[in-house]
Amino acid sequence: TPTFTLTVGDSQLDLTQADAVYVTITQVNTTITKTGEDLTIEGNVISCWLEEPDSVKLINGTAQVQVNWVYTDSITNEKKRAASDIAVISISDNLIKGALIA
């Protein structure tokens, strides 16, 4: 199962305190969004797993990735949304062919 490791912001950002975290990968006409159990978060570092149904949608080349998160403002107690800059990642044949075949 292919895994991407993403570092968001600086080390003072603790995404484990977020109410929800979403990782979105976009390539040509394909958009894949992962959250919950598909992510492991340690501070500002996110590991994102792509399983076979997702990895076979990707083609060799580049893709864009962005992290969005929802958090509760500690002063106003309001829900707020934040996002990382959009980054470009490489998609290789190894990632695409990493899908398991039963």
Image (tube, grey):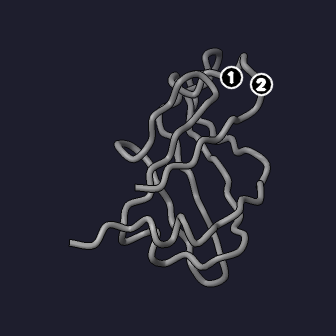
Q: Gap in Å between the C-alphas at discs 1 and 2? A: 6 Å
Instruction: Tell me where residue 14 appears, x and y as whole percent.
Output: 61, 21
Residue 7 shown left or right of residue 99 in the figure: right
Where on the picture, by quarter, is residue 12?
Answer: top right
The local crowd at label 2, few if under 14, some if 14 to 19, many if 20 or more residues have their Cα within 10 Å, is few
Quadrant where the C terminus sits is: bottom left
78 relative to 1, above or below: above
Q: Amino acid at mark 2?
A: Asp
Query: Mark 2 falls on what kind of element?
Result: loop
Residue 88 shown left or right of residue 81 in the figure: right
Quadrant where the N terminus sits is: bottom left
Determine contact: label 1, label 2, CB under 8 Å.
Answer: yes
Instruction: Tell me where residue 89 appears, x and y as whole percent.
Output: 72, 59
40 relative to 54, above or below: above
Q: Amino acid at mark 1?
A: Leu
Q: Nearer the viewer, residue 4 or 100?
A: 100
Where on the picture, by quarter, is residue 11?
Answer: top right
**Residue drawn 54% across and 66% down?**
94
**Residue drawn 64% across and 41% down?**
6
Query: Mark 1 falls on what kind of element?
Result: loop
The residue at which mark 1 appears reads as: 13
**Residue drawn 56% across and 51% down?**
23
53 relative to 18, above or below: below
Instruction: Tell me where residue 32 appears, x and y as whole percent.
Output: 51, 66
The local crowd at label 1, few if under 14, some if 14 to 19, many if 20 or more residues have their Cα within 10 Å, is some
Q: Residue furthest left?
A: 102
Number of marks present in the image shown: 2
Q: Residue furthest bottom?
A: 29
Residue 75 is tagged as none
The residue at which mark 2 appears reads as: 10
